[in-house]
Image: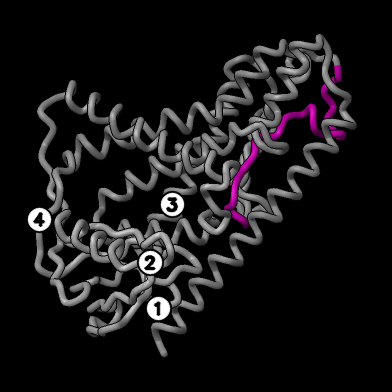
Amino acid sequence: MQVFSVLAAIFSILILIIIHELGHFLAARLQGIYATRFSIGFGPVIWKYQGPMTEYAVRAIPLGGYVGFPDEDPDSKIPPNDPNLLKNRPVIQRIVVISAGVIANFIFAWFAIITMISIGGLPEGHRATPSGVLLAQIIPDSPAQRANLKAGDVILAANGQPLSGDEKGLGAMAEVVKGSKGKAVTLRVEKAQSKEQLTMEIRPNEKGQIGVQLQPHGARVYRPVSGLSEAVSKTNQIYSGMFSQTLGGITGLFSGHTSVNDLSSPVGIVDKGSQLIQDDWRSFFWLTAIISISLGVINILPLPALDGGHLVFLLFEAVRGKPASEAFQMQVMQTGLLLLVGLGLVLIFKDTFSLVAGALQSNS
């Protein structure tokens, strides 16, 4: 089951990469603009097919993808003044091509949510169990992590008070922790892997937090939607909440409310996603929707090497009447790409180290 969940999480990410790049590709081709490469992944080619105009390829490192235009190919035999080259099209048409990947991700997320609701029903709380609250996530470098608590562990009691598996249990746990600033809290914990029950003490930080995200341990209850109108209405409501949450997390990085430690690499996303999918198949659709929205929001940021960075140059060209020099654009984009790759490698190392350390601790 765990292997299936990991593969499903990886498949979810690959779908969203394809959707994003397909948005760019179709926006170009539907306007008659040349697109000579459609690649999923980076690095060595695993499979490719040469169509009449476009080479379609799957590459070894599935951490992204790209649509290649002959404008960027110094060996292209297409005349530089050809009207169907992307660079020779009006600014508004180029803006459509650049923004189409983000738009495709936003639209796909909406359809993922309404599909889940239509097939799996609407969530209506949890069926209470007597087995405590579930640790959904452990914040890095928190009291919980230092106490060796893991996602999937269940807190059965806090300071001797039994915790039910519903929202009441969450509230009781929150009250105990918040009321224990500077004082140790005694927890009765059932470990996820061994099902062994342990008693431990953990001291909340100065804010009355131990660094965990909790969720009810009881099975989530679903009901069928009453019709298309309710499905659309609830989808819009859930979509709006996901979008606001994602946007808040991104803006929190710039305001200081969110730490880089809270970010996840593809390794971390697959790890957390596989845990969700293992608990409930519907989570595949939730995971796909939230990653799709996140991918769209991140890509539209006005940062070099992202779609938003390209849009900034296009808007500058529209206002100024002519583009910035190619040398300047290339320098900015290469610098941005190096920074993004560096951040990605740091996050991959962090998430991989956490996984390995967690596995060693759980086996010790």
Magenta residue check for 303: no
The residue under label 2 is: 210
Sort mark 2 into few (<14), some (14-19) or many (20+) by Cα contacts within 10 Å: many
Residues tagged 3 and 4 counted as in contact (Cβ below 8 A) = no
Q: CA distance from mark 1 to mark 2?
A: 10 Å
Q: Is residue 28 left or right of residue 322?
A: left
Looking at the rendered structure, the kind of residue marked 3 is Phe
Mark 3 or mark 1, which is nearer the start of the sequence? 3
Is 280 rendered above or below residue 246? Answer: below
Instruction: Identify which residue is drawn at 34% across, 35% down.
Output: 241
x, y percent for residue 212:
36, 63
Q: Amino acid at mark 4?
A: Arg
Residue shown at the point (22%, 78%) measured from the top left: 188
The label on residue 11 is: 3
Q: Are marks 1 and 2 in contact (CB under 8 Å)?
A: yes
Q: Which residues are magenta?
A: 61-80
**Distance of label 1 from label 3 (alpha carbons):** 33 Å
Q: Nearer the viewer, mark 1 or mark 2?
A: 2
